[in-house]
Image: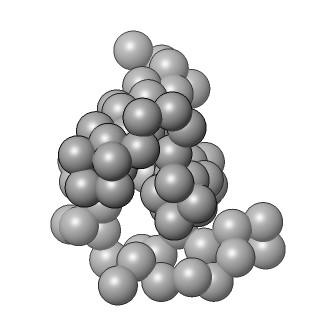
């Protein structure tokens, strides 16, 4: 799997997890609630900025934050 495909797959999986969480916890039946929509956009942006997509395992194992000029400075905490 090439890097771009891996990045897109990761974004799809994370978006699905956020959608499932929002549906169960916020009772959203249509689009995501505003908080979950913001989280989804943020997670996609972080994935786009990840410099280790080729070899990465889990974001929680990473010692580098995926931030930069186009990534903003919000922390994952």
User: Is 41 situated above or below 7?
Assistant: below
Who is closer to the viewer here, 65 or 37? Answer: 37
Q: Residue at x 23, y 46 (%)?
A: 24
Q: List x then y, in percent, for residue 32.
A: 51, 45
Q: Residue at x 35, y 84 (%)?
A: 77
Q: List x then y, in percent, for residue 17.
A: 29, 41
Q: Is residue 25 left or right of residue 22?
A: left
Q: Is residue 56 left or right of residue 31?
A: left
Who is closer to the viewer here, 72 or 22? Answer: 22
Q: Is residue 26 visible?
A: yes
Who is closer to the viewer here, 76 or 53? Answer: 76
Q: Residue at x 46, y 75 (%)?
A: 65
Q: List x then y, in percent, for residue 53.
A: 44, 43
User: Is 68 situated above or below 44?
Assistant: below
Q: Residue at x 50, y 20 (%)?
A: 5
Q: Quadrant of the N terminus?
A: top left
Q: List x then y, in percent, for residue 31.
A: 55, 38
Who is closer to the viewer here, 40 or 74? Answer: 40
* Number of marks: 0
């Amino acid at each position: 799997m090439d890097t771009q495909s891996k990045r897109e797959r990761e974004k799809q999986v994370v978006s699905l997890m956020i959608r499932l969480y929002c549906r169960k916890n916020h009772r959203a039946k249509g689009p995501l609630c505003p908080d979950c929509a913001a989280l989804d956009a943020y997670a996609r942006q972080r994935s786009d900025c990840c410099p280790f997509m080729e070899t990465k395992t889990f974001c929680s194992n990473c010692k580098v934050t995926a931030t930069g000029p186009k990534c903003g400075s919000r922390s994952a905490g």
